[in-house]
Each structure stands twice: as structure tokens, then as C-alpha cells.
Amino acid sequence: MTTDVNKIKEMAGKIALIRKEVLELKAMSGGNQSVDKNVDRILSSIKMLEINITDAAEIL
């Protein structure tokens, strides 16, 4: 069980890193609509990962 907990916490950290990188990409876009729209879609997917993984990691 500890392995599962460690993996979940590791995944939560990677998800946070992905969010940070994606937000940096959006800041770099300079308002480019195609980049901003795709970043928004990526952020929606990241949010689902956070709900599934990051929230679980906080409970464990």
C-alpha cells in the first residue's frame, strides 16, 4: 500500500509541474488565440487529473 501512496504523491507533484509549465506557455503566447485556447483545453484536462489524483494525495 505504501508504494501506491508514494506513486500517487509522485503523480500529484508531476501534475503540479505540468500545470506550472502550461501556465508559463500561456504567458509566453502573447495573446495568440490558438495557443491560449489549446492551453485552456490542457488546463481542463489537468483539472480532471487534480480532482482524481491530487485530491486523493491530500487525503492519503
Image (cartoon, rainbow, N blue to C red):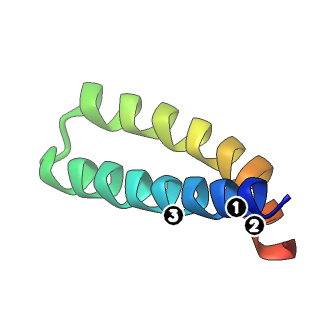
Q: Earlier in the sequence, mark 1 or mark 3?
A: 3
CA gap, disc 2 and disc 1: 5 Å
Quadrant in which the C terminus appears: bottom right
* Residue 57 on image: x %, y %: 75, 66
59 vs 22: above or below:
below
The amino acid at mark 1 is: Thr
Instruction: For mark 2, give the secondary structure.
Output: helix
Q: Earlier in the sequence, mark 3 or mark 2?
A: 3
Residue 11 at x, y = what percent?
58, 53
> Which quarter of the rendering shows the N terminus?
bottom right
Dividing the picture into quadrants, the one containing residue 34 is: top left
Of 36 and 44, the residue lying toward us? 44
Above or below residue 37? Residue 16 is: below
Q: Where is mark 2, residue-wise?
A: 57
**Residue at 47 percent of width and 55 percent of height:** 14
Q: How far, Cα to Cα, is label 1 from label 3?
A: 8 Å
Please state if 44 lies on the left or on the right of 51 as rendered: left
Residue visible at 33% across and 48% down? 22
- Element assignment for label 1: helix
Of the residues tagged 2 and 1, which is closer to the observer? 2
Dot 3, crowdedness within 10 Å: few (<14), some or many (≥20)? some
Kindly identify which residue carries mark 3: 13
Position in image of residue 32 (x %, y %): 18, 35
Find disc 1 in the rendering and name its residue: 54
Lateral position of residue 18 relative to residue 5, left or right: left
Q: Quadrant of residue 6?
A: bottom right
Q: Is there a contact, CB below 8 Å, between mark 2 and mark 1? A: yes
Q: Tell me if mark 1 has few (under 14), some (14-19) or many (20+) residues whose alpha carbon lies within 10 angstroms of its own.
A: many
Amino acid type of disc 3? Answer: Gly
Task: Tell me: residue 28, above or below residue 34.
Answer: below
